[in-house]
């Protein structure tokens, strides 16, 4: 008890705790109201409309500057990834051919691992 009386910050902590409780209660009442819901819905709608307008503006600006859009860059990156994968397969095939002795067929490509079966085949017994 003597320690509590000696704590110079105890009134500050108590005031802060009460302030936090009051603000929390006010926020809960405010957010629970229909007016808050409708205003947040309106603000979110305005934000989405602004984002769509900015997207259209940037697309038009990039087209006028003869620059690719984000979707075009992503498409190019995807196609480039496919080309790199094909080059890797061709390179592996050329290495196998180079390692083969003259007059022999190159070693077959390693078999791809098959995924595990998760379904059993339908039964062959006729339904009764």
Image (cartoon, grey):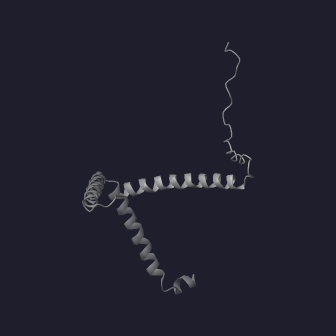
The residue that appears at 66% across and 36% down in the rendered structure is 118
Residue 82, position in %: x, y?
A: 51, 52
Which corner quadrant of the image does residue 127 belong to?
Answer: top right
Question: On the rendered image, what quadrant is the C terminus found in?
Answer: top right
Which corner quadrant of the image does residue 21 belong to?
Answer: bottom left
Foreground residue, 79 or 23? 79
Residue 10, position in %: x, y?
A: 48, 81
Q: Residue furthest top?
A: 128
Q: Is residue 85 left or right of residue 30?
A: right
Q: Is residue 127 left or right of residue 59?
A: right
Q: Is residue 55 left or right of residue 123?
A: left
Residue 58, position in %: x, y?
A: 28, 60
The residue that appears at 28% across and 52% down in the rendered structure is 38
Foreground residue, 49 or 33? 49
Examine the rendered structure and indicate whether residue 10 appears above or below residue 66. below
Foreground residue, 19 or 48? 48
The residue that appears at 51% across and 55% down in the rendered structure is 81
The residue that appears at 38% across and 67% down in the rendered structure is 22
Residue 49, position in %: x, y?
A: 26, 54
């Amino acid at each position: 008890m003597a320690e509590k009386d000696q704590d110079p910050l105890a009134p500050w902590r108590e005031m802060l705790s009460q302030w936090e409780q009051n603000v929390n209660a006010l926020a809960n009442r405010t957010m629970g109201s229909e007016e808050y819901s409708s205003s947040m819905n309106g603000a979110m709608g305005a934000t989405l409309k602004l984002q769509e307008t900015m997207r259209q503006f940037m697309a038009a600006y990039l087209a006028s500057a003869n620059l690719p859009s984000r979707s075009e860059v992503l498409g190019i990156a995807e196609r480039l990834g496919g080309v790199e994968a094909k080059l890797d397969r061709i390179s592996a095939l050329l290495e196998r051919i180079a390692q083969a002795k003259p007059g022999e067929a190159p070693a077959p490509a390693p078999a791809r691992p098959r995924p595990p079966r998760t379904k059993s085949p339908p039964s062959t017994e006729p339904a009764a």
